[in-house]
Image: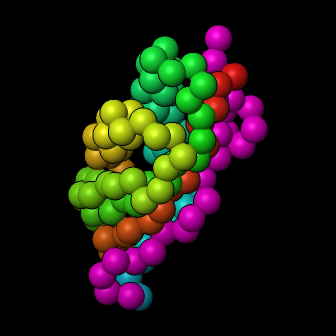
Amino acid sequence: MAGVRRHSQGPVAGIGAGGPRVAKGGSAPSRSREEIELVFDKNKGAIFALYNRALRRDPALQGKLVLKLTIEPSGVVSSCEVVSSELDDPEMERKLVQRVKMFRFKDKDVATVTTTKPIDFFPA
């Protein structure tokens, strides 16, 4: 059975890298990479479920996908888009973007942040 993993221990690896960038302002406090990673880790089950369903349609589905997301001070993901993808599965990519838009970060007194999020998908 396939599993979710960070780095090199499961079908969803590399949920990391790419530091946050302040979209507005410049010197305002920002969300940390660790905070963003924690929210993705908390939601890795949902990401895995999407990938697992896509694997049923295409057992050879694997590759790297890079998302660009904007997180508002309220914790809402105001935008998410696929920057690049090796998956060649528009349906899964669309569902993943929709799911990430549902992620919620803590409401904080920080600037709006835009960051990239690479995710490696591969069967276990």
Tell me the residue at 47%/56% (across/down): 84
Examine the structure image and report whether residue 70 is included in the region drawn in magenta. Answer: no
User: On the rendered structure, is 73 left or right of 120?
Assistant: left
- Pick whichever, 47 or 41, lies toward us: 47
Tell me the residue at 42%/36% (across/down): 89
Examine the structure image and report whether residue 5 is included in the region drawn in magenta. Answer: yes
In the depicted structure, whether residue 5 falls above or below residue 3: below
The location of residue 49, given as percent across then percent down, is 45, 22
In the depicted structure, whether residue 16 falls above or below residue 57: below
The location of residue 23, given as percent across then percent down, is 34, 77
Q: Residue furthest right?
A: 8
Tell me the residue at 38%/88% (across/down): 26
- Say whether residue 42 is visible: no
- Pick whichever, 25 or 47, lies toward us: 47
User: On the rendered structure, is 118 left or right of 27?
Assistant: right
- Say whether residue 64 is visible: yes
Quadrant position of the N terminus in the picture:
top right
User: On the rendered structure, is 9 left or right of 79?
Assistant: right
Quadrant position of the C terminus in the picture:
top right
Magenta part of the protein: which range? 1-26
Count every numbered label the image shows and give the total: 0
The location of residue 61, given as percent across then percent down, is 56, 29
Instruction: Tell me the chief SS of the magenta region.
Output: loop
Tell me the residue at 36%/50% (across/down): 105
* Image coloring type: rainbow
